[in-house]
Amino acid sequence: MKKIILIVKREYLSRVKKKSFLMVTFLVPLLIMGVMALTVYLAVKQGGDKKKVEVVDESGWFVNNLVPSGTIDYSFTSNYAAASKSFSGSDYDYLLHIPADLQNIQLLGAKTPGMMTTSKIEEDLTKVAQAHRLKDAHIDSAVLASAQADINVAAKQIGEGGEKDAHVMAASAIGLLGALLIYFVLFLYGSQVMRGVIEEKVSRIAEVVISSVKPFQLMMGKIIGVGMVGLTQFVLWIVLTFMLYSTIGGPLAARKAEAMKQIAQTQHISAAASTAQSAPEGDIANFIAQAGSLPIVTIIVCFLFYFLFGYLLYSALFAAVGSAVDTETETQQFMLPITMPLVFTMVVAQSTILSNPDSPLAIWLSMIPFTSPIAMMIRIPFHVPAWQIACSMVLMVLGFLFTTWVAGRIYRVGILMYGKKASYKELAKWFRYKG
């Protein structure tokens, strides 16, 4: 055990002292704040970037009915030939030609219009055309609008304490976020274990180390050491992001809310709608309130469990692959069967697990050790039965022990093999080797 601790200490300290570790640790929170600042800038820019459109309406439906908005300012003229001739010397961004039969409406300009501009013009034209046709048909638009009811269904959960809100959106978001974090951690730090094994094997450092420790001890020390590095980086990301958001993110969120509110007012959106759409801090508070009704303790415990054992299981496989090859390019033939369970689970997560967390496929994926770290994390916020969680955890531990035993038998031989291209047949031979 002392030898494993020494290897863990060496792996941990050698990695956390690297400049690359410090740069990535501090740059990721700054990048998150940078993305947030960019969204604020784009929101402010959206409020001030107004396109001027000259409209030639030959139908007579849209003259003085197209109301300028926060992004588009309409003006009207009657002569299309004169307008198109003088367009290049004018200060208009686009020329909108509406034929009398409303067929082949064209938006002309020196530059190709953006998708948002085109969509906004189409939306404005559709509203005016609908109002005109309703008027011709002697249909009151107010009555029609009131008849189009927006019906919402509130999901409730019935338990021993009575009814309570299910908060499906919050459960889906938390489950998917936890699954994504585990997914990226398994790939990121598992591949670091593999690269570290390859580097030590090629540089012949492993030969010196194995003269003092057993190959299995070396493998476990490397896996635990790199895992501690990942956990340290993960915790620092959370702490630094929270600190930056407290000092910088709050004012940025308020500035974005103000910009979105101004845009909503210029586009004649109701105050209630603009407040609901433009207050991220309100959304965050609402999300936190909804998350409070979920099994938070169970979610956190399960996240830590599947984070730890999922990493240990896959890192052992990555270490075995690293010991079997001499270069990283040779790992591709062995990576597919290892990564396919994770990729498959993430693919079916949104289409199957989130839409029906109690389906047979979702339950089976949450029991199989190679897929349970992803599948079970998505299902946990939906109040999974305790017996399913316990069964999944037991199978996960057994899967980790079995995988580590298999990987250790391959590692002990592969770490000392040089110059020979490994195959699945060779790996099976190494596994059966009794020396």
Image (cartoon, helix red, strand yellow):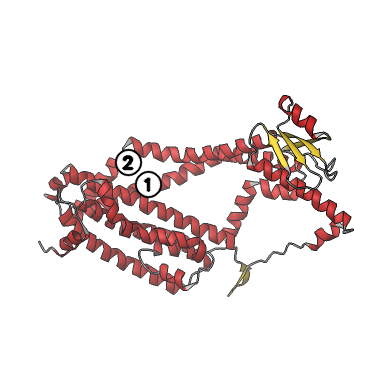
Q: Nearer the viewer, residue 104 or 416?
A: 104
Left or right of residue 102: residue 7: left
Q: Where's residue 385, x and y in %?
A: 48, 73
Q: Which residue: 79% across, 43% down?
A: 99
The spot of residue 369 in percent (x, y) is 35, 66
Give above or below for 229 relative to 148.
above
Query: Mark 2 touching mark 1, by CB under 8 A?
Result: yes
**Label 1 is placed on what type of residue?**
Thr
Q: Residues within 10 Å of mark 2 (few under 14, many from 20)?
A: some
Residue 350 percent location from the top left of the image:
51, 61
Picture quadrant of residue 93: top right
SS for callout 2: helix
Residue at mark 2: 16
- Visible residue check, residue 435: yes
Query: Given the current orientation, which residue lies at the most extreme left position?
Result: 435
Identify the residue shown where x is 80% and y is 41%.
67
**Residue at coordinates 41% horizontally, 61% vertically from top-left?**
344
Q: Name the residue under label 1.
A: 232
* Residue lying at 43% horizontally and 74% vertically, measured from the top left: 387
Q: At label 2, which amino acid type do we have?
A: Val
> Distance from label 2 to label 1 (Cα)?
9 Å
Spot the residue most to the top. 89
